[in-house]
Amino acid sequence: MTTAKRDRDEVFVEYTKSICPVCKVVLDAQVNIRYDKVYLRKRCRDHGEFEALVYGDARAYLASARFNKPGTIPLTFQTEVRDGCPSDCGLCPEHKQHACLGIIEVNTHCNLDCPICFADSGHQPDGYAITLEQCERALDVFVEAEGEPEVVMYSGGEPTIHKHILDFIDAAQARPIKVVILNTNGIRLATDKRFVAALAERNRPGKPVSVYLQFDGFDERTHREIRGTDLRERKRQALDNCAEAGLTVTLVAAIERDLNEHEVGDIVRFGIDHPAVRSVAFQPVTHSGRHVEFDPLTRLTNSDVIELIAAQCADWFRADDFFPVPCCFPTCRSITYLLVDRKEDRTDVVPIPRLINLDEYLDYVTNRVLPDQTVRAALEKLWSASAFMGADTTARSLATAAAELECAACGIDLPQAVKELDERAFMIVVQDFQDPYTLNVKQLMKCCVEEITPDGRIIPFCAYNSVGYREQVREQMSGVTVADVVPNAVELRPLVVDSPYGSKIAGNGSGDAAGNGYRPTIAPDTTNVGRPAVQR
Amino acid sequence: MTDEDIKSCCSAAYGRDAVALVLGESYHPGGLAMTRRLAAALGLRSGQRVVDVACGPGMTPCTLAAEYDVMVDGVDLGYSTVERARAAAEGAGLSGKVGFHLGDAERLPLPDNTFDALVCECAFCTFPDKSTAAAEFARVLRPGGQVGITDVTVTDAGLPPELTTLAAWVACIADARPVREYTEILADAGLRTTSVEAHQDAIARMIDQIEARLAVLRMTAADHLTAAGIDVDAVLQYTLLARQAVAQGLVGYALIIAERP
C-alpha cells in the first residue's frame, strides 16, 4: 500500500456556474489551469462530465484580471432577478454592464445554408422575419436602456434580404443611435449596386452606416467547408462596390481549427490593402447552432488566434500587441489598433499598444494615480465592444490618445498629424463567443454585446446562443416547436440527431431535461436548489 | 568632449521636447510597474521620506506619494522639467507631499542624514561622476536608509563600440556598467548592496517604444522631425544595435538595492 500522496495536475482558480451542453440545466462549474492552459469543467447529473478549453494562455488569462473596468448601470432593466444567472435575461438588475453593442436579428432566412452558422439560419420552411413595428420596439427598448446607444447591428439570418432592411436602418437613424452596422454575407452587396447606393446614401457624417462582412479566407476549401459554396468572387465584388460607394467595411472571419487557421495573416494583409476595409474581426467558430464537428478540448481560443496572427504577420505583430478589452470580461475580447503607412515598396505598421503603456491607463485594480483621465476615457472607448472604425467616437478617441502620445512635443503641430492618424488607423478584434461548453456565468454577467429581441428583452449574446433563448424566441416568433440545440462535439455523437435546421439536438428529439418537448424554463437551475447545504 | 559637456548635453537632451516625445512620459524602462517593484523592494512605508534623483516630469514622485503615502523630494537638472513636475504634482493634488528641486545628482540640494530611501531610475548610468553621485546618495540618507537604483547594465566586456557614441547617451546606455561596477561604486560610497534583480524585458520594451514612436513620427510629421534635428534612420540604427545587444545579453536592466549601514 502506498503512503505517498500525489498532487493534482491542475491549479483550481475559479468556481462558477455553467450549463449542461445537452440538457441546458444550470450546473456548478470550475475553472482549472493545466499545462499553461485554462479549462472549464462541469458535471451534469444526467449527462456526465464535460470539459472545454477556454483560454490557451494561462498567464495571459490571469494577467488580464487587472484590466477589468467597473461596469456602467443601464438606465433601465427589462427583467427581474428571480432564478439567477443565466435564467433571468435580460437584462436583469444583477447584470454588471450596460450594452456597448445591440444586435437585432431581423430574420431567420438566408440566401446561404452555411455548414457553420450559430444562428442556424438558411433556406428553411419555417422561421420568422420581424416587422417594422417589432424593429422599432426593439430600438426603443435599446434607447430607453442606453439613452444614446453607440451601435446597433442588424443581423439575421441574412438581413439584406429582409424587404424592410432599409426602413430598419432609417428607424435606427431616426433615433439617437450613433452607428448602424449591417452584418452580411455580402451577396446582395456584390449583386445589387442600387442597394449599395441606398446604404451609401444613409452613411452620413455623424450617422455612419457600415458593413460587417463575413470573410473567412481565400482558399476554396475554406469557402466550401464554412459557407458551403465558393464565394470568393462575390466577396471581391462586394468589397469593391463598398469601396466605390465609400462604405467602411469590417472583415469578419470565423476561424476553425484545421480549416482556415492558416489564413489569418493573409486576411489582415488583405484588409490593410483594401480601400474599403478599416478593421478585421476574428472569431473562433462559436460552437452554438450549426457547425462542423469539433473537440472542445482543442478548440481555438482568443490567445490561440492572437498567436496565429503574430506568427503569420511576424514582421508586424507580437502576441502582446493585443490588449484585453476592459468593458466586458477581459478574457472575452482583445483588440489592437495599428497605424499603417502604405508606401510603394513597403507597408509600415505600428501597433498602438507599443506607443502607449496601456496597462498603466487600463489597470483598474492596481493603479491609484492616474496619468490622465482624458486619455483613459479615450482608450476605454477604443478598447470597447462599441468601437467601430468610421464611428465618430472611435475617431475622436484615436485623436485624443494620439495627442497624449505627442503632447510633450510642443514643437510639432498635432491637429494635422492626428487627422491623418485616424485615416491611417486599422483595428483588429479577436472575440471568443461562449458556447454551451465554454459558458461561464462570471463572464456572461458582464457581457456588453446584447441581442435585442422582438419582445423587448436585451439578452447577452452568448446567453442567447447557448442557453436556450435563441430557440425560445424562434419558437415564439415562428409558432413551430424548436428543440434546444446541442453542440456538434465529437464526444456527443452518440447522443445527438440532426435538427430540421442542420444543427444537432438531443437524440430524444428534445434538448430539455424532461425530454417531453415541453420547455418549462430557460436553463433550470440545479445550483440554487433552495435546500439547506446539509440535509438531516 | 568633457564630462561637463556630456552631462549638460544629456540633460538638455532629456529636457528637450523632441527627445521627451521619443522616450515617453516616464522615461525609464519598465514604467510604473518597475517603479512599484522598486518601491516594494525598498519596503516603503507610510510617512517615510524619499528622494527621487533625476525625477523627470514627476511621475515617480507622484506615484510613490499616492500609493505608498510617503513624502517625496524630486531632483532634476532641467528647469522646464522641474516646472512640469510641479504642475503634475499640483494637478494630482499632491503638492503637500511632493516637492521638487532644481539640482545636480553630484551636488544634491538636500540636507544630510535625512531620508529613508532614495530612488534613481535609469539615470545613474548617465552621471559622468558616478562616485560623487553615490557619495551624495549616502550623505542624504539616514543610517539604515536605502538606495534603490534601476539601470542599464552591460557585461564585463562593456558595450559594442557603435553604442558608445554621444547619440547613444540619449538612449541612456552609453556609460552603462556591469552590475559589479555599480555595486563597487556604491560600496566605495559606503553603501552595501543587499539585493540585485535582473529585468531584461523592461529594456527590450523600451526599445520597442522608441522605435514605434519614431515610426509614427516619421509617418505623421516627417518634416518636423527633420526640423527638430532627429534623423530617424540614424536613431533606428542605434535601436537596432541596442536590440541586438539586449538579445545577446550584452545589455540588460538591473534593480539594485543598497543600504547605508
Image (tube, rainbow, N blue to C red):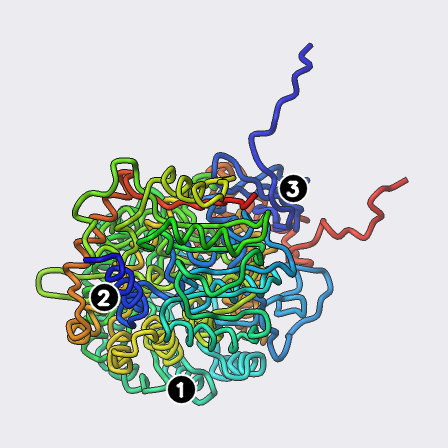
Helix, strand or loop at mark 2: strand
Q: Nearer the viewer, residue A82 or B109?
A: B109
For disc 3, the neighbor class at 10 Å (few under 14, some 14 to 19, many from 20) is many
Say whether residue A242 is left or right of residue A140.
left
Res. A215 image quadrant:
bottom left
Marks 1/2: CA–CA distance: 34 Å
Res. B115 image quadrant:
bottom right
Residue, far bottom: A174
Q: Quadrant of the C terminus of chain A?
A: top right
Residue A437 in the image: above or below residue B248: below
Say whether residue B157 is left or right of residue A399.
left
Q: Please state the horizontal and vertical placement of residue B97, each as a whole percent of the image.
A: 58, 69
Which amino acid type corresponds to the residue marked 1 in the rendered image?
A: Asp
Which amino acid type corresponds to the residue marked 2 in the rendered image?
A: Val
Q: Please state the horizontal and vertical placement of residue A325, each as a whole percent of the image.
A: 46, 62
Marks 3/1: CA–CA distance: 47 Å
Residue, far top: A1
Task: Say which residue label 3 marks.
Answer: A44
Marks 2/3: CA–CA distance: 50 Å
Residue A170's disc is 1
Helix, strand or loop at mark 1: helix
Closer to us: mark 2 or mark 3? 2
Q: Please state the horizontal and vertical placement of residue A511, each as a whole percent of the image.
A: 59, 50
Marks 1 and 2 close (CB-CB < 8 Å): no
Say whether residue A445 is left or right of residue B164.
right
Mark closer to the chain start, 3 or 1: 3
Mark closer to the chain start, 2 or 3: 3
Q: Nearer the viewer, residue A170 or B120?
A: B120
Residue B81 in the image: above or below residue A36: below
Task: Say which residue label 2 marks.
Answer: A340
Which amino acid type corresponds to the residue marked 3 in the rendered image?
A: Cys
